[in-house]
Image (cartoon, grey):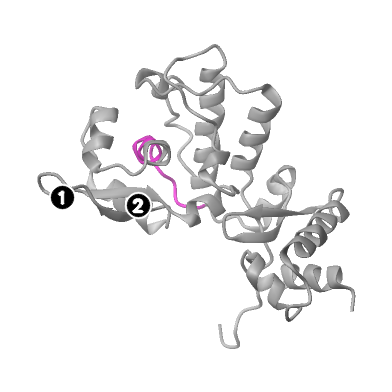
Amino acid sequence: MDAKKVLEAALLCAARALPERELRSLFDGALDTPQLRNLLQQLKLDWQDRGLELVQIASGWRFQSRPELHIFLERLNPDKPPRYSRAVLETLAIIAYRQPVTRGDIEDIRGVAVGSQIIKQLEDRGWIEEIGYRETVGRPALLATTRQFLDDLGLQSLADLPLLQGEDGDDSAAAQTHLFAALEQAAGAAQAEPFTPDFFADQGMALVNAPAARLAADISDISATPSIPSPPPEPGQ
């Protein structure tokens, strides 16, 4: 049996991203990791001019629709996702870049109180979680982003986010605008409440002036809201 066809069928039929250890199990030890990755790269090239693309994210490998097709596919799903406020997405951005952080850390950066409902919304979405407690008075919970956050934004790791530095630059504002827009798109945020472009710069967290090609690739990855095949409903559903 053609191993590449087996991988293709497994990935297309899966309702979630498949890690490499599960993909190797398809072949009962006949393929090692380098061979598997070579086949996955070949498969990725096979699909480079088609409506779906093979990508690697934090949880593994999956097929997803190409970003430029989302406008058409959304017509099949008229229901809009929950909309999140600017405060929710600013909180998410701070956690992503400064993690692990406490609620007090977030309040110090934003300059306003962070309501419990904001944290709960992000927890309900599966984008943040408590990972421990800071050993200080009151032992406040430490918050960090989850693997689900990376998967939903099409990232392999937090390293795929545009880097931060202490000094602002000419390209930082544009990069931040794209980043915030991508978060809004992924979370279904209200467009009536856009982020302030220099929000991070005001906090001494300006985006690095990365080469244009690298920055464009980062933003493209973050903006890609995935659309993967879903299994048929169970009888009676």
The image position of residue 228, as x and y in percent, is: 67, 61
83 part of magenta stretch: yes
Q: Which residue is mark 2?
A: 121
Q: Position of residue 166 (x, y in %)?
A: 42, 19
Name the residue nearer the viewer: 161 or 89: 161
Which amino acid does the dot numbered 2 rest on? Gln
* Magenta highlight range: 81-91
Asked if residue 22 is among those painted magenta in the image, a careful observer would answer: no
Q: Nearer the viewer, residue 197 or 34?
A: 34
Q: How many marks?
A: 2
Please tell me in which quadrant of the rendered image residue 26 appears: bottom right
Where is residue 130 shown, x and y percent of the image?
Answer: 30, 55
Circle 1 residues within 10 Å: few <14, some 14–19, many ≥20? few
Name the image quarter holding the C terminus.
Answer: bottom right
Q: Secondary structure at mark 2?
A: helix
The residue at which mark 1 appears reads as 139
Mark carried by residue 122:
none
Front one among 206 and 226: 206
Q: Residue at x 78, y 72 (%)?
A: 31
Outermost residue toward the bottom? 235
- Distance of mark 2 from mark 1, alpha carbons? 22 Å
Q: Residue furthest top?
A: 170
Q: Is residue 232 left or right of residue 129?
A: right
Secondary structure of the residue carrying tag 1 is loop
Residue 91 sits in which quadrant?
A: top left
Quadrant placement of the N terminus: bottom right
Reply above or below: 134 against 63: above
Q: Amino acid at mark 1?
A: Arg
Nearer the N terminus, badge 2 or badge 1? 2
Rendered residue at 68%/34% (across/down): 217
Q: Identify whether 25 is placed above or below 17.
A: below
